[in-house]
Image (cartoon, rainbow, N blue to C red):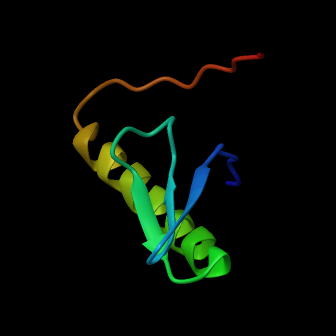
Amino acid sequence: MTMQYRIALRRSEEGYSVSCPALPGCWSQGETEHEALENIKVAIAEYLAAVSDSLEDQEVRVVEVTV
């Protein structure tokens, strides 16, 4: 499944920091913009896996939202 998320990319003295505002606490960094973008993809996947694991014993539904 492919999903799209908006990310916030900020340049810093150490390189780049990147976060995903839709997923609170989901952030990463990298020395280059490319590295930071690759790292946030991994962070998002791990975040979603942790959320999925936490919902294992609950009823979960999928809804479609148009904005």
Q: Work out which quarter of the rendered image holds the N terminus and state it.
A: bottom right
Indicate left or right for 64 with 24 as reference: right
Q: Residue at x 52, y 64 (%)?
A: 40
Task: Quadrant for residue 51, please give it.
Answer: top left
Looking at the image, residue 60 sits to the left or right of residue 6; the answer is left
Q: Residue at x 45, y 70 (%)?
A: 29
Left or right, 53 with respect to 49, comes to left
Q: Residue at x 59, y 75 (%)?
A: 38
- Residue 8 x %, y %: 59, 48
Point out the image quarter for the C terminus: top right
45 is higher (above) or lower (below) than 35: above
Instruction: Give how far across and how far down residue 43 sits, in percent.
Output: 43, 63
Q: How many marks?
A: 0
Q: Residue furthest right?
A: 66
Foreground of the two, 44 or 2:
44
Residue 62 location (% of width, % of height): 56, 25
User: Toward the viewer: 6 or 52?
Assistant: 6
In this rendering, the answer to whether 54 lies above or below 17 is: above
Q: Residue at x 60, y 56 (%)?
A: 9
Percent position (x, y) of residue 30?
50, 78
